[in-house]
Image (cartoon, rainbow, N blue to C red):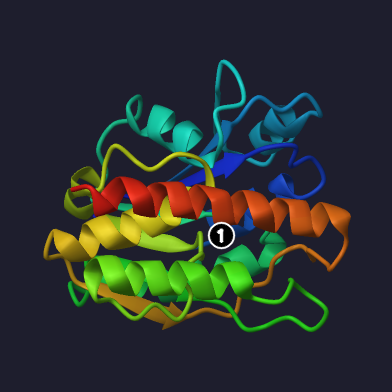
């Protein structure tokens, strides 16, 4: 089975290279594609040097837009592995995500990362997103905002077009469950770059919450 890893990156210089190298070390991964979402800091060059195939968005489209644009231009694979840019060496743990999908035990596997000390805010956005997913699909999500996912090509096709911005994760989960696909959450020993309780961290989480709410409202009308 062909496995394609797809990473949306924005201003990821200094972290995307180590993430790509770690993903390429995963035995089941055949190719790593990085879509540079309008960065100007050398993200694309670093990703290419690490061995990824690089696609460059014409402008900053947001996470969902960047992924959707890339998916429209790459050949089909049996399984697509979606990962965040800042996993670094821990991206090698993606094996745990791929196992249930490759074994036919799940159509969508969502990574549940261990809680990092000093990382994150007050979990308000996470709780809101989990509540929205449950209301819209009945699925009880432990990690509603996780960007670490493995999907069969059939499941991925069914959840497209992807929701915009950071709402891509909520939209993907709701649409997959509604479509009758088997969604499982899987513990993975991965870690993100720290996002603390500071101004930039709260702004980032506010954007995530806004995008998740938009994705949910769109699905309430369907």
Estimate the x, y position of residue 183 in percent, counting from the top left: 26, 72
Estimate the x, y position of residue 3 in percent, counting from the top left: 34, 52
Figure quadrant of the N terminus = bottom left
Is residue 138 shown to the viewer in this render? yes
Estimate the x, y position of residue 7 in percent, counting from the top left: 53, 45
- Choose top left, top right, bottom left or bottom right for residue 175: bottom left
Q: Residue at x 66, y 54 (%)?
A: 206
Task: Between residue 214 and residue 69, name the one nearer to us.
Answer: 214
Position of 35 with respect to 74 (left or right) is right
Task: Between residue 150 and residue 117, name the one nearer to us.
Answer: 117
In this picture, is 153 found above or below 183? above
In the current view of this chain or complex, which residue is farthest to the top?
58
Element assignment for label 1: loop
Q: Residue at x 21, y 43 (%)?
A: 157
In the current view of this chain or complex, which residue is farthest to the left?
180
Position of 131 with respect to 183 (left or right) is right
Q: Residue at x 32, y 62 (%)?
A: 173
In this picture, is 93 found above or below 82? below
Is residue 27 shown to the viewer in this render? no
Estimate the x, y position of residue 149 in percent, counting from the top left: 42, 62
In the current view of this chain or complex, which residue is farthest to the right?
198
Which residue matches tag 1?
25
In this picture, is 122 found above or below 68? below
Neighbour tally class for label 1: few under 14, some 14-19, many 20 plus, Cα within 10 Å: some
Position of 126 with respect to 199 (left or right) is left
């Amino acid at each position: 089975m062909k496995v394609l890893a797809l990473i949306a990156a924005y201003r990821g210089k200094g972290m995307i290279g180590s993430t790509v190298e770690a993903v390429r070390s995963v035995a089941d991964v055949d190719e790593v594609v990085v879509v540079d979402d309008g960065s100007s800091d050398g993200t694309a060059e670093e990703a290419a040097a690490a061995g990824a195939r690089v696609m460059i968005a014409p402008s900053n489209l947001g996470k969902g837009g960047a992924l959707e644009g890339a998916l429209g231009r790459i050949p089909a694979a049996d399984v697509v592995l979606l990962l965040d840019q800042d996993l670094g060496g821990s991206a090698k743990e993606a094996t745990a995500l791929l196992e249930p999908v490759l074994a036919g035990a799940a159509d969508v596997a969502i990574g549940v990362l261990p809680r990092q000390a000093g990382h994150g805010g007050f979990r308000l956005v996470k709780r809101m997103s989990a509540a929205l997913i449950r209301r819209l699909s009945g699925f009880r999500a432990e990690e509603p905002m996780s960007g670490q996912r493995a999907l069969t090509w059939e499941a991925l096709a069914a959840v497209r077009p992807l929701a915009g911005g950071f709402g891509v994760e909520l939209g993907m989960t709701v649409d997959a469950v509604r479509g009758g696909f088997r969604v499982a959450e899987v513990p993975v020993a991965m870690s993100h770059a720290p996002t603390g309780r500071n101004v930039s961290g709260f702004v980032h989480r506010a954007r995530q919450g806004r995008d998740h709410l938009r994705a949910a409202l769109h699905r309430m009308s369907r």
